[in-house]
Amino acid sequence: MEARFGIVGSGLKPYSMPSPESFRALAERAEDLGYDSIWIADRIASGQGGMFLLEGMVTLAAFVGYTRRITLGTSVLLLPLRHPALVAKQVASLDYLSGGRLITAVGIGENPKDYEAVQVPYRERGARVDEAIAVLRRLWDEGPASFEGRFFRFEDVWIEPGPIQAGGPPIWVGGASEAALRRAGRLGDGWIGYMLTTERYEHSLGVIRDHAREAGRDPDAFTPGLMLPIHTDPDGDRARRDVHERLTVLANRYKGHATADFLAREVCAVGTPEECVDKLKAFEEAGVRSFVLNPIVPSSDPVSDCERLFEEVVSVARSS
């Protein structure tokens, strides 16, 4: 396979948090093993207790310090929750400190409590993220920046030091709605899909390319990515039993009509290592070029999870 492989290093923990030391150990081990990237999740608030997740930009900064070579991405940063000028400064600083290793993947999320907590209207999140992407690009250009929009306005503003990467880190767009696909094609340098069948992924990528062409952009200068929930076990039936409760929650949350069995079979990579590699191949044939692997049933030892996933799936997929 020619695709690149990353792992979610900071994701939602529905039961308890790993130790602070485990985050450093995970980042260092993922880099040593040869993963292409590590990804940081993001959330501000929850509507219930027991939903543990570190703040995205703080965690990204920690992972910049923990690593030396590996690409680091946000998957996804909930951009409408923050003023884009602050995000532009934070990302520029982290890109500088990392030596230009960042990808900024952004999205809007679906949790109203995030927006309620920071007093940003939930109904405005799509319009806000579109405008915020434009603000980021303007502020990452050389020289003074000015902007006049619906939500944000400034004149002759400098962001120094600027990012190491010319024009700033690539901006990828997360999501699978029609609005997200349009946003990815017209505004993004890449796309991270989620909870998609191979057929829907391929169709969605075609829609994105059409939007890119309509906007006068090169559809080939674009990275198609996928966050893929994954769980592997030499006993494939046991793997499916292990994820059933979690996938039932995801079925109710994202698809409504779908079942846990459908998600395990069609949307996630669940089963034996061989079955998971075959799923990766199928998604690559559908157009994926960058995988963000998200363990569905993490153990209390994230480093061991990272090692096993690399040995049983990533290394095999790369050699096939």
Image: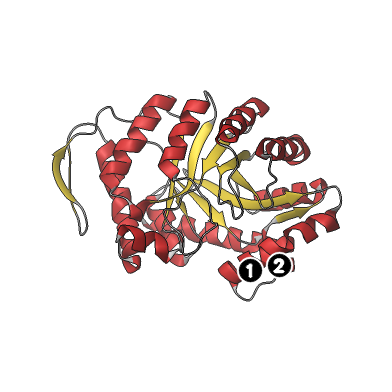
Q: CA distance from mark 2 to mark 1?
A: 6 Å
Residue 189, percent from left and from top: 43, 45
The local crowd at label 1, few if under 14, some if 14 to 19, many if 20 or more residues have their Cα within 10 Å, is: some
On the image, the x and y values in percent for residue 31 come to 60, 28
Q: Which mark is residue 176?
A: none
Residue tagged by mark 2?
Answer: 260
68 in relation to 243, above or below:
above
Judging by the rendered image, the residue that carries numbered circle 1 is 251
Q: Earlier in the sequence, mark 2 or mark 1?
A: 1
Percent coordinates x, y for residue 183 in the rendering: 40, 57
CB within 8 Å, label 2 to label 1? yes
> Whole-percent x and y of residue 172?
45, 47
Residue 95 lies in quadrant = top left
Along the viewing direction, whichever of 295 and 302 lies nearer the viewer: 302
167 and 218: which is toward the camera = 167
Would residue 71 appear left or right of 116 to someone viewing this image? right
